[in-house]
Image (cartoon, grey):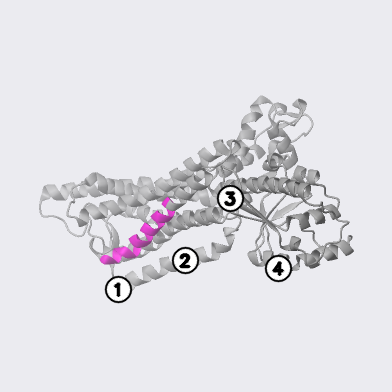
């Protein structure tokens, strides 16, 4: 406190209040330090977590760790033994508090990018994320130091060192970005509901769990940081009588890392890594650890074997014992990690695309019934309208999209050139079978960063391309067609269809 009231009873009440406050600091900051340390250790230990977007959680925990250390030291030391310590605490606290809330906001912003652009790899924004967070933290802290605005915050029962005076407009340097991050969090939650509301029955279980985890993440972030804003607002309005709000504010601020660690611990991907790690150091019985023919654990099964096991195609003799059933569910639950929301969005879009392709092929059949059929043996005029032909329609609910196929009959002829019948093409792109192997979604490691996935039979690749590449393909299509017709053994990559759809 800045001053001690002359009333002995008030002095005693203030001292007791500070004693309780320091105890809250010690308890909750210790939990936060342990929680943040758990995230940092698990991230560095499990190489499977060394990828985007889990790296964002790593830097959030790093910020929480150092921010919580401030409160632990304050709880242990008590009142400042010398004036300069308050300045150091204020600088330290503001820098790491700004970094902590900024990483929370960045995680929400990254979710927004993934939901709005599910076929674009958000890892390309990581450098921007770091530049923004650390620049904001450093520059805002330097401004407060240069203008000498860091000192005792003058809060009742609250021995805090941060921005001087409760009515100081410099507090907006922290709370304006915080309000923006709240907006990011709420908008990300809204998009999650909007993008996943049309999930099919197969995804209903995962959809509920994804949305529940998203709600918990947003509520915890908004609620904890809202407590401090509400507390300061009550003092600004002249009401300093809510001692319980002081303690709640202290617990919320010093317990940030613990709350984020609770979310991380409940993360299915983290729990799965822990379970696999534990299995390596625990003895296995024949009943728990071996399958009769595969002879290895679920974690070592191939994607094809996992698909057979999940779809029921695996013979009964090869199935795991009943005790192992929970392990399979355990593995599958990694799909309701909030960082995998874009996986489900992409999955629904891909399945919708496949359904549209099937509908387009049916349309081609109808054209063949009413027009002279085309095949690879016929000569087609390079100036034919077939090279500029488009088929556009709107898909059926629940996910309404506008679908467009470029030059459908030309690409059909190209498929015929290489022995791909319509039935085999439909079989390779069967949505129900495709849905079982959509874990092979990837982004190109090249400069384009394009998204692609393979068909279940490995014959075809679905790949996203830029609009400029579409225009180039359309421009060169007649030359491409004529070249393949003249050089059937060419090593040029084969394009068997060009599709575009809008949500």
Label 1 belongs to which residue? 147
**What is the residue that sits farthest to the front in this orientation?**
370
Label 4 belongs to which residue? 472
Look at 51% across and 53% down and name the residue there.
111
Q: Looking at the image, is mark 2 or mark 3 earlier in the sequence?
A: 2
| Residue 200 found in image quarter | top right
- Please tell me the numbered disc located at residue 132: 2
Query: Residue 19 in the image: x percent, y percent?
Result: 26, 47
Q: Label 2, label 1: how many angstroms apart (C-alpha)?
A: 22 Å
Residue 172 is inside the magenta segment: yes
Which quarter of the image is occupied by the N terminus? bottom left
Give the vertical position of 483 relative to 262 (above or below): below
Report the front residue among 493 and 306. 493
Query: Residue 440 in the image: x percent, y percent?
Result: 69, 48
Q: Label 2, label 4: how many angstroms apart (C-alpha)?
A: 36 Å
Q: Looking at the image, is mark 2 or mark 4 earlier in the sequence?
A: 2
Q: How would you rate the neighbour count of disc 3 (Cα within 10 Å): few for under 14, some for 14-19, many for 20 or more?
A: some
Q: Label 3, label 1: how many angstroms apart (C-alpha)?
A: 55 Å
Label 3 belongs to which residue? 401
Residue 114 is inside the magenta segment: no
- Residue 342 appears in the figure: yes
**What is the residue that sits farthest to the left in this orientation?**
7
Q: Looking at the image, is mark 2 or mark 1 earlier in the sequence?
A: 2
Q: Looking at the image, is mark 4 or mark 1 earlier in the sequence?
A: 1
Dominant SS type (magenta)? helix
- The residue range painted magenta reads 169-186
Look at 79% across and 46% down and name the residue there.
422
Residue 418 is left or right of residue 309, and the answer is: right
């Amino acid at each position: 406190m800045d001053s001690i009231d002359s009333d002995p009873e008030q002095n005693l009440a203030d001292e007791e209040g500070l004693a309780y406050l320091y105890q809250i600091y010690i308890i909750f900051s210790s939990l936060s330090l342990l929680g943040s340390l758990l995230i940092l250790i698990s991230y560095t230990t499990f190489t499977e977590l060394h990828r985007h977007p889990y790296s964002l959680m790593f830097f959030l925990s790093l910020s929480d760790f150092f921010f919580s250390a401030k409160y632990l030291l304050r709880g242990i030391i008590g009142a400042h033994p010398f004036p300069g310590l308050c300045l150091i605490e204020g600088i330290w606290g503001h820098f790491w508090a700004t970094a902590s809330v900024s990483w929370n906001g960045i995680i929400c912003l990254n979710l927004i990018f993934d939901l709005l652009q599910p076929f674009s790899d958000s890892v390309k924004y990581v450098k921007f994320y770091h530049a923004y967070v650390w620049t904001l933290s450093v520059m805002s802290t330097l401004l407060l130091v240069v203008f000498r605005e860091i000192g005792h915050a003058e809060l009742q029962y609250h021995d805090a060192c941060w921005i001087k005076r409760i009515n100081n407009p410099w507090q907006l340097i922290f709370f304006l970005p915080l309000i923006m991050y709240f907006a990011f969090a709420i908008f990300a939650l809204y998009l999650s509901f909007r993008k996943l509301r049309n999930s099919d029955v197969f995804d209903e279980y995962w959809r509920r769990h994804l949305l529940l985890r998203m709600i918990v993440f947003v509520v915890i972030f908004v609620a904890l940081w809202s407590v401090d804003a509400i507390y300061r607002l009550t003092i600004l309005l002249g009401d300093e009588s809510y001692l319980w709000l002081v303690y709640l504010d202290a617990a919320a601020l010093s317990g940030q890392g613990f709350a984020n660690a609770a979310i991380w611990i409940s993360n299915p991907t983290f729990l799965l890594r822990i379970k696999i790690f534990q299995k390596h150091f625990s003895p296995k019985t024949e009943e728990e650890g071996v399958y009769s023919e595969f002879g290895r654990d679920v974690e070592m099964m191939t994607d094809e074997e996992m698909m057979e096991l999940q779809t029921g195609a695996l013979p009964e003799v090869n199935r795991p014992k009943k005790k192992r059933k929970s392990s399979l569910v355990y593995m599958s639950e990694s799909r309701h990690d909030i960082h995998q929301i874009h996986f489900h969005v992409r999955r629904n879009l891909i399945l919708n695309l496949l359904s549209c392709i099937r509908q387009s092929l049916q349309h081609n059949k109808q054209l063949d019934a009413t027009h002279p059929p085309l095949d690879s043996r016929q000569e087609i005029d390079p100036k034919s309208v077939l090279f500029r032909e488009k088929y556009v329609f709107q898909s059926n609910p629940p996910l309404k999209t506008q679908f467009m196929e470029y030059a459908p009959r030309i690409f059909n002829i190209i498929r015929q050139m290489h022995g791909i019948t319509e039935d085999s093409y439909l079989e390779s792109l069967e949505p129900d079978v495709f849905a079982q192997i959509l874990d092979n979604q990837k982004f190109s490691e090249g400069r384009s960063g394009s998204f692609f996935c393979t068909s279940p039979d490995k014959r075809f690749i679905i790949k996203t391309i830029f609009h400029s590449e579409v225009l180039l393909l359309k421009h060169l299509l007649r030359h491409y067609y004529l070249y393949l017709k003249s050089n059937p053994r060419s090593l040029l990559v084969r394009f068997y269809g060009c599709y575009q759809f809008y949500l």
